[in-house]
Amino acid sequence: MRPFLAVAVLTLLLATRVCAAPELFGIDPETAPAGTKLTFKGKGLAKTRHVLFAVGRTVKPAQFRIVSDSELEVIAPDYFRPQAQATVAIFGSDGVTVAMPATAQVVKSPVVGRNAQEAGTSFFHVLDGGIVSLANSVAVIEAGGIVQRSQAAAMHFVKRGGVLEEFDERTGVVFHERGAMLGPALFRPEVGLTFYNVPTISVSPGVGPFLYQPAPRPELEDAPHQPPEIRSFSPRSAAAGDAIMLEGRGFARTVEVTFYGPTGQTQNVGFQVVSDTKLKVEVPELNRSLRASTQLIIVNTIDGLTFTAPREFVARWGKGLENYHASSSSGNYPLLWIDSGVTFAPRGGHVLYIAPGGTVSPTAPGVYFVKKGGRMAANASGGVQVYYETDAEVPDTIRRGNGRGHEVNAIVPSVIGAPFVVVAGPVFRR
């Protein structure tokens, strides 16, 4: 071989090697609870800088340790909803590789796209000539591929010559090579996306997704049977996908945790029972129209239910509340506390606690907590959600299991200093 030709070939090989993204061959085990140590097998892993898990609209960084160029030890990040499936991406100094499940939807021509449930396996791999009108799951867009709109995916990977026109998820992340074509709608201030330029994007086919299993509960059979109570939580604010710790009592037999926002949106979230006095819960997604959102936290156990009642947000019945109307667009709301001897017919508002002897006649959407001795009039309507103690007086339509009524053993308000606040992401920051 001529010297100049040998030098040219060597230069090309070195350039190819320098710009090569890592490769992922397998994950062991492929299903386990959050916090499990996983083994990643692959190639070029010694330069790993970040490992990400994407579930639904949430991106989470994972702790990892480099064992060798062919092996990583990775801790599955906190995610508490069982059967949720995570897409894994490995970032090295020379590029990123995305674990592409065997069930990936390879798109070679125009398709409408479809909603991907959080626990689903949807993954769009858009090739040259492929057009996806609506992508609600992780996507790799090759040169010549087009995603016209992404509505709920945590992240997209856009290669040189690939097109991503619009991305609605304000906490989303877009990784792209130089020369990727990103639509002007992505750069509106209210979208709030984060963009990262990466040298190369590649896929590792047939790997994953990682399947989350429920975390084993601690041995708490001897914990006293008592309604739950939240005494504090930390941090006071966090982004979607983060975990917060509730402290109090009666958490051993938790069956459901729900967040309730100022627009009337309820979201059940994943949780992990740490002990009878500690409960770790996952922060829900933020409503796309808000930059921050106060949230009430509802913890339901087999022994009863509690909800956070922030002191500064609690309004007891009094003069001036007769014509009270709450705004659902303000981002804040009071929790109305209806005491004994009070009859109240709210025309608006979201959250009411009906103490023994109190009466409400709701005609507006909201969440209502009715104690034994409290009364909800028979004309209750407007899409209400009602949690009630067994001997509370609620309409038969609520008791008959129409999806709006939830009978619980006991209801205990948890009076705290301030509400929890969900803030805009993204969770992942480099």
Image (tube, rainbow, N blue to C red):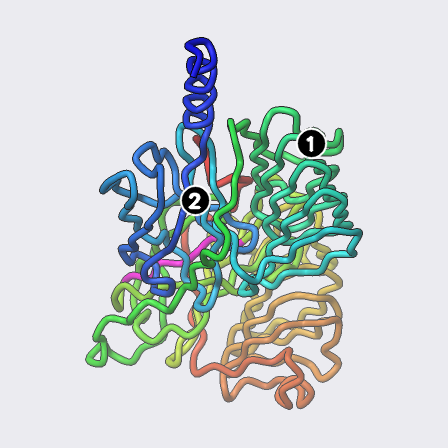
Question: In the figure, is residue 312 to the left or right of 179?
Answer: left
- Write the residue at 41% across / 43% down: 23
| Image-quadrant location for residue 140 | top right
The three-letter amino acid code for the residue at tag 2 is: Leu
| Image-quadrant location for residue 393 | bottom right
Magenta stretch: dominant secondary structure: strand
SS at mark 2? strand
Considering only vertical position in the picture, is 418 above or below 405? above
Choose the circle earlier in sequence order: 2 or 1. 2
For this orientation, the residue located farthest to the front is 1
Between disc 2 and disc 1, the foreground one is: 1
Image coordinates of residue 335 in percent, x first then y, are 57, 58
Considering only vertical position in the picture, is 199 above or below 389? above
Can you tell which mark lies on residue 200? none
The three-letter amino acid code for the residue at tag 1 is: Gly
Image coordinates of residue 120 in percent, x first then y, are 56, 65
Residue 330 in view here: no
Question: In the figure, is residue 80 to the left or right of 335?
Answer: left
- Write the residue at 45% across / 58% down: 208
Question: In the figure, is residue 269 to the left or right of 126?
Answer: left
Image coordinates of residue 382 in percent, x first then y, are 75, 71
Can you tell which mark lies on residue 52? 2
Magenta highlight range: 278-284
Residue assigned mark 1? 161
SS at mark 1? loop
- Write the residue at 78% across / 51% down: 109
Spatial separation of the CA atoms under disc 2 and disc 1: 24 Å
- Whether residues under marks 2 and 1 lie with C-beta atoms below 8 angstroms apart, the answer is no
> The N terminus is located in which quarter?
top left
